[in-house]
Amino acid sequence: MTTPVNARRWTNWGHNQESVAEVLTPGGIDEVAASVNQAAANGRRVKVVGSGHSFTSIAVADDQRMTVHRLNQLVAIDGPLVTVQAGMKLSALNALLAANGLALPNLGDIDEQTVAGAISTGTHGTGAGHSTLASCVEAVTMVTAAGKVERFTVDSPEFPAVRLGLGALGILVEVTLRCVPTFVLEADERPMSLADVLAGMADWIPAYDHVEFFWHPYTDRALLKRNRIAEADDRPLPRFRGWLDDDFLSNTVWEQVCRLGRRIPRTVPALNGFAARALSPRTYTGRSDQVFCSPRRVKFTEMEYEIPRAALPEVLEALPRIYDVLPFKVQFPVEVRFTGPDDIWLSHGYGRESAYVAVHQFIGAEYEPYFRAVESICEPLGGRPHWGKLHYRTAADLRPVYPKFDDFVAVRDRLDPARVFTNEYLDRVLGS
């Protein structure tokens, strides 16, 4: 097939996925519908790309690539229900909500994703009382493969599928989110031994609104982060301390440490020990989204697995054995977060208390043997891979761990029988 004149190369944030495809840049819902109608009539495919923060090939287009960055406006605010166009970034949404006395009840630590991309891949934060960001969705407006603009609400039979649809069911153009009044978090962050962190988890998870930790490979050191809702923002982080910790040390210095470790692998255990010792405790208050989200300029590749919470010790005990046999060193900390159950069909946390284990490698460093080894530990435990993070699963072995998998596929068959919105990744994880 001849490459179209307006074909452009696209690379994701982690620089591990790319494609060359014809680019569509609609400026409104009618233009989205017209493009889909034309594609369907010509037997073509359309794949929407958001901010490119997925490490899987979920957003890789093999025919037409649509960007919805021009669909980024506020549609309506009706009490706690906020409707925005689906191409709005989370960073812009957070600012918009704060200006109107509102907030999302939970967030991950990166706010560069589009709203559509975040809910469609299962983006999540941490907290036993929370699940994926998609759990905040009250309604969506979507352009289906028939070129129709349809609104799906909690009363729609397809709603448990379209809330977290992997981009397989249609093109989201508007999303209605149930928000909460603006709130302040008290953040307590402190280095501890991994043993002490694990010993306290049973108490901290129910006592705090949000709990997570980072463990440095080849060391016994971890960073524990606990957040709880506070009455007032009366202990803000001093500006210099915030710059020093979150900008200079966590980005500028950390990138140079990673570059050194990639160039001289034998230094990695010592560098990880140095990084762990450089951490110091801090307690502060701040607006919720500003506590949840941090700048992330050091690029990496990532795999994240959801597992039943009770299985976490088994996974953590297996990781040092993996490190002992890998043909390379692991620099990035292991991130562990916790969520509660939800009823969204393809949510990683569907129906159970979850622990999430995320493993990373610095950009340009080898990762596949590491990620495959972690997957081999998590899969037999009933683990579910994050849809936007690297994994090697297929529809055949994902079906048993998602009780509503076939229900989702049935909705896909109904809404996109000709597979206008599919790509290689969706064929692999959902079947063709």
Image: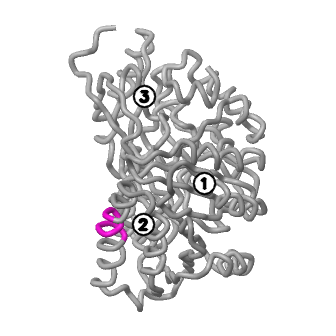
**Amino acid beneath label 3:** Lys
**Amino acid beneath label 1:** Ser
Q: Which residues are magenta?
A: 250-256
Residue beneath disc 2 = 293
> Which numbered mark, 1 or 3, is in the foreground of this view?
3
Q: Is residue 417 above or below residue 167?
A: above
How many neighbours does mark 2 have within 10 angstroms: few (below 14), some (14-19), or many (20 or more)? Answer: some
| Residue furthest out toward the bottom | 234
Looking at the rendered structure, which numbered label has been put on residue 135?
Answer: 1
Query: In the rendered view of the protein, which quadrant contains the N terminus?
Result: top left
Q: Main secondary structure of the magenta part?
A: helix
Circle nearer the N terminus (3, 2): 3
How many neighbours does mark 3 have within 10 angstroms: few (below 14), some (14-19), or many (20 or more)? Answer: many
Residue at point 43%, 64% (across, down): 267
Q: Is residue 56 above or below residue 132?
A: above
Asked whether residue 253 is drawn in magenta, I would say yes
> Which numbered mark, 1 or 2, is in the foreground of this view?
2
Residue at point 43%, 57% (across, down): 265
Looking at the rendered structure, which numbered label has been put on residue 83?
Answer: none
Colouring scheme, one of rainbow, by chain, secondary structure, one colour: one colour
- The span from disc 1 to disc 2 (Cα, nearest Å) is 19 Å
Locate residue 119 relative to residue 87 in the image: left or right: right
Dot 1 and dot 3 residues touching (CB under 8 Å): no
Circle nearer the N terminus (1, 3): 3
How many neighbours does mark 1 have within 10 angstroms: few (below 14), some (14-19), or many (20 or more)? Answer: many
Residue beneath disc 3 = 47
Residue at point 51%, 64% (across, down): 333
